[in-house]
Amino acid sequence: MLGWAVTFLVIALIAALFGFGGIASASAGIAQIIFFVFIALFVIAMIMRAVRGRPPV
């Protein structure tokens, strides 16, 4: 999921470089949403792992 966020960020940067403002804005927004979803799922996974009592790897 983090790879998708980076991909959309790169697309946004390239689109902004060539002057495509609408595409750059949309790609940056998608990248931001995917990144925050990734962070939320990561935190939930860490909490669930701590609750189950497994030691960290």
Image: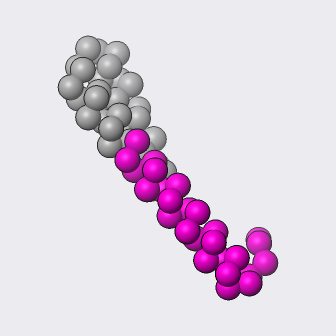
Q: Is residue 25 above or below residue 45?
A: above
In the picture, which quadrant includes the N terminus? bottom left
x 45%, y 48%: residue: 35
x 66%, y 77%: residue: 49
Q: Nearer the viewer, residue 20 or 38?
A: 38
> Horizontal and vertical percent for residue 44?
55, 68
Q: Is residue 28 above or below residue 45?
A: above
> Horizontal and vertical percent for residue 6?
45, 41
In the picture, which quadrant includes the C terminus? bottom right
Q: Is residue 55 magenta?
A: yes
> Horizontal and vertical percent for residue 38?
48, 56
Query: Can see residue 56?
Result: yes
> Horizontal and vertical percent for residue 33?
37, 47
x 58%, y 63%: residue: 43
Tell me where the magenta segment starts and ends, as one range. 32-57
Q: How many marks?
A: 0
